[in-house]
Image: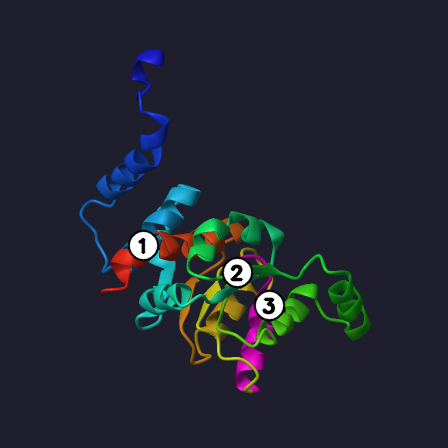
């Protein structure tokens, strides 16, 4: 079996992975920076379904790149998504990543109101008084609350990455956010996750210089 192992230098593993992904896409391409987003989602999950289920509103990825380069904040619904975002790269543009899920007052408020912490977290993000990208990888209730906040005129996200994973209200919440009238990147269906939300954000961070000219 050892003779079948491909010898790749550690510094070249990601590059080789992206080459394999491009090969297995059999010539399929997308405009940048959408293509970089799709490839990074596949790279993160080894799931080629993302080539078909990722939906972008008009110029969503370009708008996301531009917002990040202006120093937009990124608000996540999980610590895992927050941890996965390249905060060093984000800070180079003047941006910050926030996750309010572990805040004691968030938990207390959610308990008192009978709602989820994720919904309260979206309200905290809306109150930041700055340009915000919301990266949701777990809670459909976060997307539902974002939709409500948008309709109430309380927030106008630069971009919503709507990638909750699961079975209860996940598909419906994604479809709802696609009607909210704001830029979105959404993997349709049940698939997604905090790793995917972070991967989408990182793809836009990593391709910022190139993508900004499109």
Q: Quadrant of the N terminus?
A: top left
Q: Which mark identifies residue 171?
A: none
Point 49% across, 68% down: residue: 174
Mark 1 crowdedness (10 Å alpha carbons): few <14, some 14-19, many ≥20:
some
Question: How many numbered marks are there?
Answer: 3
Q: Main secondary structure of the magenta part?
A: helix
> Which one is earlier in the sequence, the residue at label 3 or at label 2?
2
* Residue drawn at the location 60% of the way across and 61% of the way down: 139
Q: Which label lies toward us, 2 or 1?
A: 2
Q: Secondary structure at mark 3?
A: helix
Which tag, 2 or 1, sits closer to the chain's start? 2
Q: Which residues are magenta?
A: 137-152
Q: Foreground: 10 or 18?
A: 10
Using the image, determine if residue 61 lies above or below residue 25.
below
Vertical position of residue 146 compared to residue 88: above or below: below
Distance from the alpha carbon under mark 3 to that under mark 2:
19 Å
Coloring basis for residues: rainbow
Q: Which residue is mark 3?
A: 142
202 to the left or right of 111: left
Residue, x 34% and y 53% (percent of image)? 38
Q: Residue 207, labelled with which disc? A: 1
Q: CA distance from mark 2 to mark 1?
A: 18 Å
141 versus 18 height, above or below: below
Residue 189: percent from left, percent from top: 46, 60
Q: Position of residue 122 (x, y in %)?
A: 61, 70
SS of the residue at dot 2? loop
Q: Which residue position holds label 2?
A: 96
Residue that lies at the very extreme toward the left in this rendered image:
27
Q: Position of residue 151 (x, y in %)?
A: 54, 85
Task: Determine the secondary structure under disc 1.
Answer: loop
């Amino acid at each position: 079996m050892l003779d079948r192992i491909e010898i790749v230098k550690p510094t070249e593993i990601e590059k080789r992975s992206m080459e394999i992904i491009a090969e297995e896409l059999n010539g399929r391409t997308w405009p940048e920076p959408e293509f970089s987003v799709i490839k990074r989602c596949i790279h993160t999950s080894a799931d080629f379904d993302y080539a078909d289920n990722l939906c972008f509103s008009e110029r969503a990825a370009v708008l996301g790149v531009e917002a990040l380069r202006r120093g937009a904040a990124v608000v996540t619904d999980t610590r895992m998504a927050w941890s996965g975002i390249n905060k060093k790269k984000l800070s180079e543009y003047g941006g910050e990543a926030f996750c309010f899920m572990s805040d004691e007052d968030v938990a207390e408020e959610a308990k008192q109101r009978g709602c989820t912490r994720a919904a309260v977290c979206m309200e905290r993000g809306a109150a930041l008084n700055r340009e915000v990208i919301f990266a949701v990888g777990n809670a459909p209730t976060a997307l539902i609350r974002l939709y409500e906040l948008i309709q109430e005129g309380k927030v106008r996200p630069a971009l919503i990455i709507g990638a909750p994973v699961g079975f209860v209200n996940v598909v419906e919440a994604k479809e709802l956010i696609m009607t909210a009238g704001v830029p979105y990147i959404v993997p349709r269906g049940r698939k997604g996750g905090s790793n995917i939300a972070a991967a989408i954000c990182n793809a836009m961070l990593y391709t910022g210089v190139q993508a900004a000219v499109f």
